[in-house]
Image: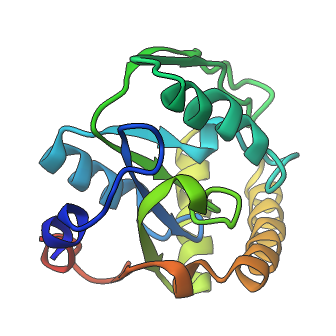
Amino acid sequence: MLLELLDSKQPKAGPVKFIAIDGRGGSGKSTVAKLIADKFSAEIIQTDDFASWENQINWWPLVIERVFQPIIDGAQTLNYPRSKWWPTHRPKPVVNQRVTPIMILEGVTALRKEFRPFVSLGIFVDTPRDTCIQRGIERDLANNTGKSKEEIITMWQNWAKGEDDYINRNNPKDYAEIIIDGTQPLDDQLF
């Protein structure tokens, strides 16, 4: 299914076909992105490298400036700083990431209206809100963020409200050509 759809699409960001994988935090987007990246030798750009708890939605100009525009201008590699999510989080910058014929933009708001002129194919990972929140809380507790369980629960509840606003404004599920059930085996839904 994915291969046939992708073959029918044209590149919209210079020579690159971007696959945008959107859905709520904790829906399974990263897993889907890894499966596709392995299948197509594609590089992954994560929206989490630009977003943060403090700037959940309005970081999008950085992706255009640091990813899409350099590719359109002929860049063969990408370099950009990553955002900081926790006081103890010290992410290394992205350095010399290859530009590949197929690339993946993965993360919450990857199918936002501002990115659609650059995206060749959209995928939405549809997972119930409560399941996503629970997965996110469990992931952040395991990542030793320095936050208490109560703080993480509050952060995820607030994050989900921001996602609700984004989904209501941008309708990413309606724009996606492929909708995946994030509670079911993913391979069977893609290939």
Q: Residue at x 36, y 27 (%)?
A: 99
Assign the N terminus to one quadrant of the image. bottom left
Q: Residue at x 53, y 80 (%)?
A: 175
In percent of width and height, residue 187 lies at 16, 70
Q: Judge left or right: residue 187 versus residue 134.
A: left
Q: How many marks?
A: 0
Q: Quadrant of residue 163?
A: bottom right
- Height in image: 113 above or below 63? below
Name, please, the residue furthest toward the top.
Answer: 95
- Height in image: 65 above or below 39? above
- Height in image: 11 above or below 108? above
In percent of width and height, residue 129 lies at 61, 83
Q: Residue at x 48, y 52 (%)?
A: 106
- Using the image as rendered, state which of residue 4 and residue 154 is in the foreground: 4
Task: Describe the colour scheme in one phrase.
Answer: rainbow
Whether residue 152 is visible to the viewer of this picture, yes or no, is: yes
- Height in image: 10 above or below 90? below
Assign the C terminus to one quadrant of the image. bottom left
Q: Judge left or right: residue 142 versus residue 64.
A: left
In percent of width and height, residue 142 lies at 53, 46
Name, please, the residue furthest toward the right.
Answer: 54
Q: Judge left or right: residue 153 versus residue 187.
A: right
Q: Quadrant of residue 32?
A: bottom left
Q: Judge left or right: residue 144 versus residue 19.
A: right
- Using the image as rendered, state which of residue 152 and residue 183 is in the foreground: 183
In percent of width and height, residue 107 lies at 55, 55
Whether residue 145 is visible to the viewer of this picture, yes or no, is: no
- Using the image as rendered, state which of residue 122 and residue 92 is in the foreground: 122
Q: Quadrant of residue 19?
A: bottom left
